[in-house]
Amino acid sequence: MAYDQYFDNVSLLLHCDGANNSTQFLDNSKLPKIITVNGDAKVSTVQSKFGGASLLLNGSSDYLSLAANDAFAFTTGDFTIEAFIRPSVSSGHGIFSTQRQSASAPFGLAFDVRLVSGSPRLEVFYGWNSNGYQTAAQTVLTDGSFHHVVLQRKAGVIEIYLDGAKLTLTTIGSGIASSVSFTDNVAVIGRNFATAAVEYFNGYIDDLRVTKGIARYSDGYTVPTVAFPDRGPRVVGTVTDALGNPASRIVRAYRRDTGAMINSVVPRDTTGDAYRRFVSLMLHMDGANNSTTFTDTSPTPKTVTVNGDAKVSTAQSKFGGASAVFGG
């Protein structure tokens, strides 16, 4: 199974899967957030990039929103916002945006498709639409297929990608300075800002992912061919000492390319059972002869109630010198 080496940095992960016309959208990030459906936003099985379904938005009243969360406050660091989109021919607008909680100055960062002289362009702006960047016309966006679009900041520089290619940007107003700190933390999908009833997205969005602290892409990257992974790297196995006995040690995982440590963990137990965390009940039936005490040694021990004359017997055993004996 594929994994995402940056999964711990994922702020939001929407596969937009489900039954046709469902209004339930699940966040598959490490710290799932509640998705609020607005208007007639819903799951559609008519079009999809992965998973057989996508988010359908009507371009006039539909969008998804999330409550304020620091996971969307990118401050001055790197970030990546990406999705597969299939906008309609007639309009585009908001893919993903953030806004401030202040009613007097709510507008934050917005990534959208904008029609200019009838042709779709990808655009990013900050603080309503006075400052930002815009690409040249990208007519391929309305060819009836899903396209991978990316907005990221890498080392202070705003970048936009389409299907693996880095696009040239034209500055709007004064652009977005590398020193700008994005502290806006209310997220909106399918509309530019929750407090502005304008610029709704018309079409389908599938597999939307937001990553904080990481700029994932460079020019010429390979466009994902499967849905974004729901987990990070894992190390599974048994730790033993020099004599081959199960042991408790700190296990550290490092990136091969950079040498940076990904994570560290201490084994949950020293039984040598790689599947111990899934064990519901474990009875060894050990103890003194005729004892009526039976101990569950699973990860979540349960109380064992003795009925009739059930008891421990040392007369017969497979392991440990004792077993449970029942009168029948």
Image (cartoon, helix red, strand yellow):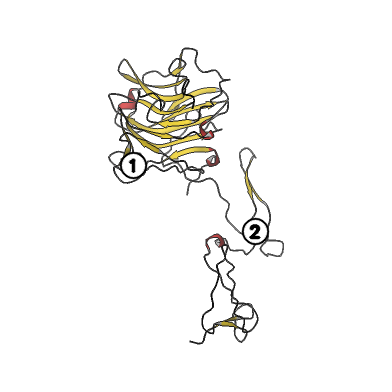
Q: Is residue 142 above or below residue 116?
A: below
Judged left or right of residue 56, residue 292 is right
Q: Report the residue marked by disc 2.
A: 239
**Dot 1 amino acid type:** Thr
Q: Report the residue marked by disc 1.
A: 23
Q: Residue 200 in the image: state x and y as whole percent.
A: 34, 26
Assign a secondary structure to mark 1. Answer: loop
Assess disc 2: are there few (<14), some (14-19) or many (≥20) residues with their C-alpha within 10 Å of its C-alpha.
many
Q: Residue 323 in the image: state x and y as whole percent.
A: 58, 80
Q: CA distance from mark 1 to mark 2?
A: 45 Å
Which residue: 41% across, 19% down?
Answer: 135
Which residue: 68% across, 58% down?
Answer: 248
Residue at the extreme front: 103
Residue at the extreme top: 173
Q: Residue 31 in the image: state x and y as whole percent.
A: 51, 43
Q: Quadrant of residue 94?
A: top left
Q: Residue 127 in the image: state x and y as whole percent.
A: 47, 19
